[in-house]
Image (cartoon, rainbow, N blue to C red):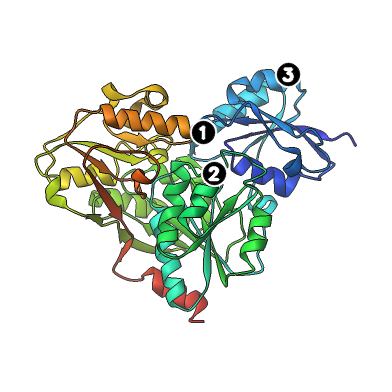
Amino acid sequence: MTPIRTLIMGAAGRDFHNFNVFFRDNPDYEVVAFTATQIPNIDDRRYPTELAGKLYPKGIPIYPESDLLKLIADLKVQQVIFAYSDQPHEVVMHKASIVNAAGPDFRLMGLESTQVKSTKPVVSICAVRTGSGKSQTTRRVSLILRDMGYRVAAIRHPMPYGDLVKQRVQRFATYADLDRHECTIEEREEYEPHIDNGVIVYAGVDYEAILRQAEQEVDIVLWDGGNNDFSFYKEDLAIVVADPHRPGHEVRYYPGETNIRHADVFVINKVDTAQPENVMTVRNNLNELNPKAIVIEAASPLFVDNPEAIRGKRVLVIEDGPTLTHGEMAYGAGWVAARRFGAAEIVDPRPFAVGSIIDTYKKYPNTGAILPAMGYGAEQMKDLEKTIDRADVDLVISGTPIDLNRVIKIKKPMQRVRYELQEIGKPTLEDVLKAKFGKK
């Protein structure tokens, strides 16, 4: 049988995983190309031979998604796999229509063909949209399980933007590990808070190899999801976070709806800052799709070192990049803190933007008067630093989960905003985890 010529549409994450667990060493398929989108500077390179396996001695080329139709024709593609997340259902089906009209089949791969089975219990934390609060939920779960006597590690959804061979399996236990692996701002935003809590983080490219290494030192594996993707691992408890600041998005985005229908537990986050009617809309939508799941309501209380330093100041607000860009949020914790603690003005950073930051605003015009903490490489970090330096403000408010001064030099006074998950009422995550696992 002639192998089916396959192209995988991705964003340097789910696409590589699907290849590794299903297509690598599979003689029934020939993956002729990946396409890349969402993340800058990940196209025009190759998935390396060392990771691609014996069927691909030259590796696999990665092209911009904008070349999709040309690639289908030139490479005689018979099947296209859609393998990235946080897309409206309508957009996914537009892409399906483009592919089908060009000839190939269009495929979405599910849990059965992509999830890896662990030898240890797995708790997954996923979401309905980027920026819902997976990270603080994962941190909360990790600390509860640790207090219950379990050794845990967080395995983070991939963000492999550098040398893929070197990033095959990564382990982060200290800040030195972050420096050694030349982590981007986006990676640090996910890893540093776990390290601060004394929790080891794994990430990389080959997620079965990552899992097998992590299993050697933990009792329970935590899947710390990215975007609104579903877990790479078969979970024993699936927790899904929803965001009432974007009511209705939980049923309109792929694969967030997959997470809803698969969940054991819902955490409706940010109820302290959302409109009550929006909380009810989200709750009703979740219940309609999955009435058996446990529902927990939670807040994300803000902590600022010196709130009085904000009062009366003209401020520049910096937020987590992916939350503002493909997460489509117009604000985050930094903006809320600026308003709550009496900033005189939230200054629009767009007139001060340079280089790749200008490009980011062009690509995501709904970002608003907030600066996304973009830092997918050294050049973009430098552009971020220059934009902050040029801004005519009294104070910088950073709503990112990390201290930006570790990776760029901020010359202006700065206040960091921190936030953690706080359950409201019963049941709590601790109740659920104790019922599932008991004390060690």
Q: Nearer the viewer, residue 61 or 103?
A: 61
Disc 2 marks which amino acid? Met
Asked if disc 3 and disc 2 are in contact, CB closer than 8 Å, the reply is no
Choose the circle earlier in sequence order: 3 or 2. 3
- Asked if residue 23 is positioned above or below residue 142 in the image, the reply reads above
Between disc 1 and disc 2, whose residue precedes?
A: 1
Residue ID for mark 2: 159
The residue where tag 3 is placed is 73
Looking at the image, residue 224 sits to the left or right of residue 20; the answer is left
The residue that disc 1 covers is 39
SS under mark 2: loop
Q: Quadrant of residue 271?
A: bottom left
Element type where label 1 sits in the image: loop
Q: Is residue 21 above or below residue 299?
A: above
**Viewer can see residue 225:** no
Tell me where residue 246 appears, x and y as whole percent: 34, 43
Residue depth check, mark 3 versus mark 2: number of the one nearer the observer:
2
What is the C-alpha distance between the residues marked 1 and 2? 9 Å
Tell which circle, 1 or 3, labels the residue nearer the N-terminal end.
1
Mark 3 surroundings: few (<14), some (14-19) or many (≥20) residues within 10 A: few
> Which amino acid type corresponds to the residue marked 1 in the rendered image?
Ile
